[in-house]
Amino acid sequence: MSFSAPDNFETQLQYITWELENTHRHVKNRLLKAKTVAEAAEIVLRYYETPAVAVDYNLLVQDKPPIIQKILSAEEIAEVYQAEANERIKDSRFIFDEMMVKTA
């Protein structure tokens, strides 16, 4: 499948669909079993996207000698992850509610 105009919304949806049908089938299977918007948002955050806390941590420690790399505690990682999850769930609920209004 070829994709054009990567900044085009339709192209982005096609790519996500391709990934869920091919390289991320396990995510699709979990999403199909989700019973709530919050559960679906958590699945996408945990299994499809890389949370910012992981990206930020990797950027923080890359190219640094191990002796001076900052080690985040499990509590710090969990706190940042939960804050991001809560924000994603809020955004997902908003989008879901907007879609329901438009299709009603």
Image (tube, rainbow, N blue to C red):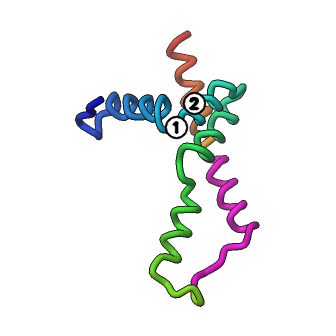
Check the image and name the residue furthest to the top. 104
- Disc 2 is placed on an element classified as helix
The label shown at residue 79 is none
Residue at the right extreme of this rendering: 75
Q: Are marks 2 and 1 in contact (CB under 8 Å)?
A: yes
Residue at (23%, 34%) from the top-left corner?
4
Instruction: Tell me how many marks there are.
Output: 2
Residue 89, image x, y percentages: 64, 40
Residue with the most extreme front position: 22
> Looking at the picture, which amino acid does disc 2 mark?
Lys
58 w.r.t. 78: above or below? below
* Magenta segment boundaries in residue numbering: 69-87
The answer to whether residue 2 is left or right of residue 30 is left
Q: Is residue 69 above or below residue 81?
A: below
Q: Estimate the x, y position of residue 57 in percent, counting from the top left.
A: 56, 69
At 72% across and 60% down in the image, what residue appears? 78
Magenta stretch, main secondary structure class: helix
Q: Considering depth in this image, is 16 or 26 the residue closer to the camera?
A: 26
In the picture, residue 27 is in which quadrant?
top right
Disc number for residue 24: 1
Q: Quadrant of the N terminus?
A: top left
Residue for badge 2 = 28
- Asked if residue 65 lies in the magenta stretch, the reply is no
Please check the rendered image and state whether residue 82 is part of the magenta-colored stretch, yes or no. Answer: yes
User: Considering only vertical position in the picture, is 83 above or below 16?
Assistant: below
Q: Quadrant of the C terminus?
A: top right
Classed neighbour count for the residue bearing mark 1: other residues with Cα under 10 Å, few (<14), some (14–19), many (≥20): some
